[in-house]
Amino acid sequence: MFELVARNIACQTIVALSFFCSTLEVILALERILSSIEPHIYHLRGSSPFSLIILTVNVSLLSAYVGYSSHGLCYIKLGGVILSVVDFSTILINLFAVRFCKGRYEKMFDKATLNARYQVKEAYEMALAMRPVYFYSLVVRVRMRNDRGKSSSIVHRRHACSWELSMLFSSTLICPLTRTDTSKESIYRQSR
């Protein structure tokens, strides 16, 4: 009996953390778009720590609720649908962010200040760098959900945490921001 309760709490925690990461990915993709709409204002104003704390607390509470409702209240399929919608929306928002930031940078090339152009270029490069992480994250999470759906055996449930850890470590390996090759040729190849 205790093992069943501990496993249920572990599954709630895994779903909550997965939803938390997915939601923060959406927020990061949206932030890239917002930073390039009015780049000179964004550059001068900076980020507000108070609003970031409030946003993080709200996302944490929402994540805990999704984790609890999906495994604690046995709405497992609803939790999977919610996670899938958030993952797909992250990719769609990121695709839009890359296109929007690139177009915005090309449009304002000779018309804006250096800080504004730098802000938009940085938003574009960050959105482009996060694209492989979002795709890989989606593939690993869909794979993990499919493995859970095929069998309800203890083996699949015990390996759910290892899937999340492998996703975390390997996503840092494929992210272009963590690469050490910063030569001009390498940067040029990455931007093409």
Image (cartoon, rainbow, N blue to C red):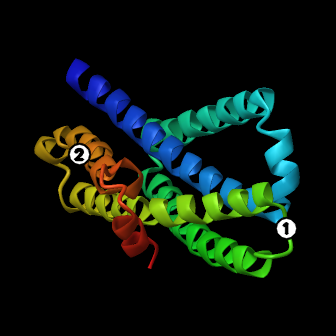
Q: Are marks 1 and 2 in contact (CB under 8 Å)?
A: no
Using the image, tell me which numbered label, if any, was put on residue 112.
1
Horizontal side of 111 relative to 166 (left or right) equals: right
User: Can you give x and y, in whole percent of width and height, for residue 181 in the image?
Assistant: 30, 55
Identify the amino acid type marked 1.
Answer: Ala
Residue 168 to residue 88: above or below: above
Q: In the rendered view of the protein, which quadrant contains the N terminus?
A: top left
User: Can you give x and y, in whole percent of width and height, for residue 61 in the image?
Assistant: 63, 32
**Residue appearing at x 56%, y 39% in the figure:** 63
Horizontal side of 142 relative to 158 (left or right) equals: right
Asked whether residue 18 appears in the rendered view, the answer is: yes
Other-residue count near label 1 (Cα within 10 Å), few / some / many at <14 / 14–19 / ≥20: some
Residue 108 to residue 75: above or below: below
Asked whether residue 30 appears in the rendered view, the answer is: no
**Residue appearing at x 34%, y 66% in the figure:** 186
Which numbered disc flags the more N-terminal residue, 1 or 2?
Answer: 1
Q: Secondary structure at mark 1?
A: loop
User: Can you give x and y, in whole percent of width and height, for residue 101 in the image?
Assistant: 68, 71
Q: In the rendered view of the protein, which quadrant contains the C terminus?
A: bottom left
Q: CA distance from mark 1 to mark 2?
A: 43 Å
Of residues 192 and 16, the one drawn nearer to the viewer in this rendering: 192
Residue labelled with disc 2: 166
Residue 58 to residue 108: above or below: above
Identify the amino acid type marked 2.
Answer: Ser
Horizontal side of 94 relative to 139 (left or right) equals: right
Of residues 130 and 41, the one drawn nearer to the viewer in this rendering: 41
Q: Nearer the viewer, mark 1 or mark 2?
A: 1
Of residues 107 and 76, the one drawn nearer to the viewer in this rendering: 107
